[in-house]
Amino acid sequence: MRGEQPVVVEALKVRAVPEGSHDSLLEFLRLYRDAVRLVVNDLWNLDEKLSRKKLHEAFYNKLRELGLRAHHAKEIYVYAESIVESARANSGRKPVLRKLTARIDKYDYRLDLDTTTLTLKLHNDYEVKLKLLAPRGRVEKFRGWSNYELAVKYDGKGFWATVYFKKTVKPVKPKTVMAIDVNFDNLTLAVFTLNGRLVRLKRYKTQLRKVLTHRIWVERLQRRYAKSWRFVKGVGRAIEKHGKRIKNISWDYAHKIGDLIADLAFKHNSVIILEDLKKLRENAKKGRTFNKRLALWFYRRVQFCVEYEAKERGLLIVRVDPKGTSSKCPRCGSKLVDNGYRTLRCSKCGFIGDRDVIAVVNLYKKLTLRPRCGGLGVLLNAPEPDENPSGMRGNRDEAMKNTSNYMNLYES
Ligand SMILES: [Zn+2]
């Protein structure tokens, strides 16, 4: 990791409409495909894998004679070689190329984000200008990224462009640790300093009750029309509608919360701790009931979004085994029992706390007590003084009532 800047890559795939005639672009795509075919055929008859230099010697002039540009030629023989290699490794059958797709080097196109137009350099010095049909916001995001390669495709009806962007992110040096716990009703997050002081505690309602209502509707319909719902139009449509709502609610929410969490983590320079869901599955019989499965499914989506957003901001993510985080006393490690009102009590030392907050405290402790990789070792060896006690302001969440309990745990 050291010295190496993490790179984020993302593709923008959009419909592209040529200004004026389609003809030269279609002609180019056919020429391009035929050129790839030609190289594939030649390579297929060889028994060896050619080096870049040999590929160049064998095909460059041939391809240039077809009217292709220098970088087209390079893209084509490299692409053909990769097709042949993967066909040999997979099926052993000679690949058949039908699709009209061209990969284009950054030297052969110009992308204007202001007007969302793409200018492609084609064979025989033709040029084509394409209007990209993308919403402003989706394009705006890539300002400041660098674009490096592009694929243009014809699907029989229209053209598609996929532009690949990349950006190097500056890794954030961790100053705090953020732990996140998700259960059916709440998503709880806590930010701790490296020496264990809680500086931020937030609780968000999940949207799973809403999801559950739609789910119940679906089940009710399926039960009532047990034999026919697949075939009765109105019922099928209603089920589909509820299914769509479930999807939208959970994705929207996961995106929003992922953004929000990553922003907050960035502000606090946090390492983000997430539960390792693979471990969660291994740990005995959790997730039996439907609600628990739903919460797990939701957490997976949130994790996906958090991870994506965090990576873009150069934040580090660590996964810990969630075993015991919601059942063990954060003070003495004994088993906790239900104490009513979403609180848990330790039968051994008498500790009482909010169950969501206990979970995030335990997650935090897992990270600091059992360092696994170099990064965390550094974290442990270089504790820094509390720097943001004002982070406590504005937290009116009821979970805060008990924070004095947790703060005591880390006083050294
Ligand atoms: Zn205890």
Image: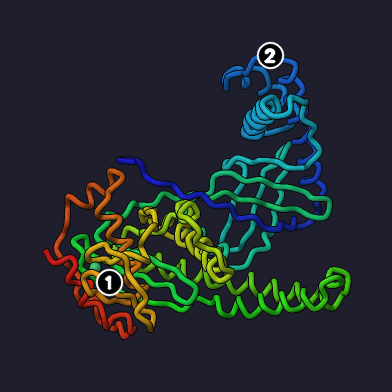
- Where is residue 271 shown, x and y percent of the image? 32, 58
Query: As displayed, is residue 157 above or below residue 412?
Result: above
Residue lying at the far top in this picture: please name it. 47
In the drawing, does residue 133 fall left or right of residue 409? right
| Residue at 80% over, 51% down | 22
Quickly name the residue at label 2: 47
- Where is residue 89 shown, x and y percent of the image? 66, 26
User: Would you say residue 73 is visible in this rendering?
Assistant: no
- Where is residue 212 shown, x and y percent of the image? 61, 77
Q: Amino acid at mark 2?
A: Asp
| Residue at 68% over, 63% down | 133
In the drawing, does residue 411 fall left or right of residue 357? left
Q: Residues within 10 Å of mark 2 (few under 14, many from 20)?
A: few
Which image quadrant is residue 34 in?
Answer: top right
- Where is residue 378 shown, x and y percent of the image? 22, 48
Q: Secondary structure at mark 2?
A: loop
User: Would you say residue 11 is visible in this rendering?
Assistant: yes
Quickly name the residue at label 1: 346
Which image quadrant is residue 74 in?
Answer: top right
Q: Amino acid at mark 1?
A: Cys
| Residue at 69% over, 72% down | 244
